[in-house]
Amino acid sequence: MAKVQPRTLSGFMELLPARQVQFDRMAAIIRESFSLYAYTPLDTPLIEASEILLAKGGGETEKQIYRFTKGDSDLSLRFDLTVPLAKYVALNYARLAFPFRRFQIGKVYRGERAQRGRFREFYQADIDVIGDGQLDISNDAEIPAIIYRTFTALGLRRFQIRVNNRKILNGFYAMLGLTAQAGAIMRTVDKLEKIGEKSVRELLTAPEIGLTEDQAAEILKFISIKGCNADVLAALEGYRNRHPMFDEGLDELSAVAKNLAAFGVPETHFVLDLTIARGLDYYTGTVYETTMLDHPEIGSICSGGRYDNLAEYYTDKQLPGVGISIGLTRLFFVLEDQGYLNEQLNTAPADVLILPMTEDMGPAIELATQLRSTALRTQIYGEQKKFKQKMNYADKLGVPFVIFLGDDEIRQNKVSLKNMRTGEQETLTLTEATIQMIEALGAAGDTPIQDKGE
Amino acid sequence: MAKVQPRTLSGFMELLPARQVQFDRMAAIIRESFSLYAYTPLDTPLIEASEILLAKGGGETEKQIYRFTKGDSDLSLRFDLTVPLAKYVALNYARLAFPFRRFQIGKVYRGERAQRGRFREFYQADIDVIGDGQLDISNDAEIPAIIYRTFTALGLRRFQIRVNNRKILNGFYAMLGLTAQAGAIMRTVDKLEKIGEKSVRELLTAPEIGLTEDQAAEILKFISIKGCNADVLAALEGYRNRHPMFDEGLDELSAVAKNLAAFGVPETHFVLDLTIARGLDYYTGTVYETTMLDHPEIGSICSGGRYDNLAEYYTDKQLPGVGISIGLTRLFFVLEDQGYLNEQLNTAPADVLILPMTEDMGPAIELATQLRSTALRTQIYGEQKKFKQKMNYADKLGVPFVIFLGDDEIRQNKVSLKNMRTGEQETLTLTEATIQMIEALGAAGDTPIQDKGE
């Protein structure tokens, strides 16, 4: 028969078993962490009517979208988890309790040009809190606390959550009479780390934006306010009472910073940074970015912010919210690429592999049933192969333990347990063997990331 | 602004929060159960090249498939988890250890006509064991053991796994010289429960199949062999030595039945049933179906079997396997529809909701951080609302516990804990409150299904 060459589409991550276990462990820790903060899990369809997904319309997104027809339906694959959330909340408004706190970990699709580290199918892990009419600023402080807890639980140490407030930026540009140019200015200032201060100054004074040298200097001075959070807030107080929007933003940012100690986030991991604006017009207040201190070149690995109105394309209800999103597939790729994955993590499908040395499989099956009742992941090797092949299999799987069960062991009501890491082998009672395995497995590190920095 | 009417596509399940928690709990138990038997998790793309997914070609599937182009790529959404597995194994053959045991829980897509209980996007939960060249029959016995354990863990009691072997059927028809008609006969016999014996006899003797009355009687006699498993096997022994394929099938079925006691599956839940053939030509040996005893009309909720060659469209390697698939979305729909879902399951996003009674949120935030460190899912209600609205929110969420934290409690270093189920309220130390909550939550039933039968 003619064969079709097996392949996986470019831009679609498909992992070998051990890596998949690492990925799933990351996702599980994120899920646990989001749950601990009382977010409810949501699962919306991958496919939506195009009129729903593209209600906002236009922009880069529309070009990247996977859109097709089936029968007479115009359908699209979701490109983020925010638009489906907006639809969900508008559709189920009367049946939800507000503030509505949901997390969703799911795949999204963007037909970008395939390149290393860029994915067309990728997981996002999102949390959002949606208020009905209004939403307290305390929620904006909780989000970085959750991200801090989540990344720490994953094993990441050297990261920093950067926070700003769009009202401070918009208020500041309004003070200077530059509201009309504010968008273009912020997009330019956003490039500061990439292109440097000199190039930013040139762009700001170029005809497209058209600032005076004084205005550009004023802006560069403002966004260069740095230091510990107390210093940044003190410097910002110097601009108070010049524009109400600025003052509102400063109050919000101060409130967020104030609650962080109570939330258990150390200042080492949380910084007020006036250069953070987020490209999207969507955000209206607090904005977040998260960077890895040893790899600033990667950019933000977790971003989000406050928005005034989640579902304006579907409902007249005012639904303000605040949320953040981890690009999970990309984060995993980066961590793997940079050697952050914890190679000590047990990624074998089994904790213990039973090699029956008798023809009758009955005793091995009974043993496996007993081991599983103690939550040990147990596999019986049932194939008729030579001993060496069986051991090769155990090696290739990477199982931590092998049990040999032959006539001798069965007669003595014992098992021969081999620790595959140390190479030690002992004949033990089932209870002794079980305790030994559970202790050894419990002692192994289990965070999926091993961050060398501290 | 003109609004787009929010809607979710017909045939796409989208659950409200409490139901989503029930669904996720089901999926989590299935995942745990599959892991306990040492299957490794796999996650393949939703989208594949059409030439890959449709390598087998033809049939009902091709009409139902979601197929589209993006750029110059001809793409399709997967319609099951078996074809992606075949591609994966063929593609990664050299890097996998065989037998390769994987589970996958994921969405698949079929553009069927939308009707009640039929879904276009639905979850399948699959396990498969793939051998390299050969695969021991003991694997065929383990599969029903896993399904028994999984459904029991979900809380389901009154179900039965039905097993047969295609070689017995094919061997039997070969004995009668009816090999050419075997496919048509089996498809007809498969309808026995739906249309009754008389109609099956008429179809068998109608010109399309063209059996004699004697042949039809012989077939109906054969497939009516019933009783306990020992009786069925004894009756089948009466046909031995008439066709080698039959004998091989009988040996396999006997081996499967023999190991089941060791695997811990009671005879009440496992029955040899000669009417099971599975429509697909794909299966070559053992076949499985699973029915709910109180709802036979639902049909099989979990099906599968043994196949000779997983990936013949992609590789020359002979890769026999055995597997089974739970149609998870449909199962959930049926269980909900029939009132099986355990309404006592805690589906609130939070175990405890803190209502701060002071302006300063600091003490509430610190309390929440402490509660989360004991793994209690904790939410702070941070909105400025009236007391009644706060309690309404707690009711609507269905949280089991509320903590009031006012000036009095803060001064005494205590909390006021209200059990929302009993209505009792006490002022306690944090330790006392924590213990009380953990005990009460641990005592609540946690299987997602509550099967009334026993």
Image (spheres, coloured by chain):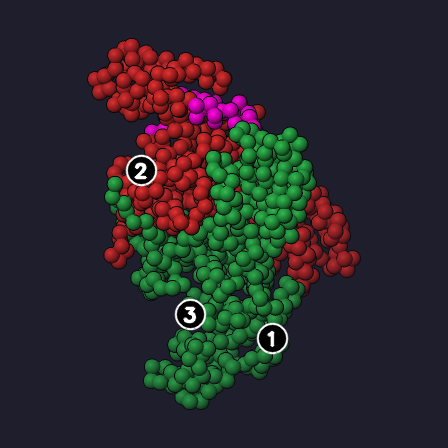
Chain colours: A green, B red
Taking the magenta stretch, the answer to whether it contains residue A44 is no
**In the displayed structure image, the side of residue B287 where residue A247 appears, left or right:** right
Res. A229 mark:
1
Q: Which amino acid type is marked by label 1?
A: Asn
In terms of depth relative to the viewer, which is nearer, B432 or A402? A402
Residue drawn at (58%, 30%) of the image: A363
Please say if the residues under marks 3 and 1 sit with CB atoms less than 8 Å apart. no
Q: Which residue is mark 3?
A: A279
User: Magenta residues?
Assistant: B251-279
Q: Which residue is most to the bottom?
A: A213
Q: Is residue B127 above or below residue B178?
A: below
Residue drawn at (46%, 69%) of the image: A298
Q: Position of residue B197 (x, y in %)?
A: 35, 15
In terms of depth relative to the viewer, which is nearer, A282 or A17? A17
Taking the magenta stretch, the answer to whether it contains residue B266 is yes
Cα distance between the residues tagged 3 and 1:
23 Å
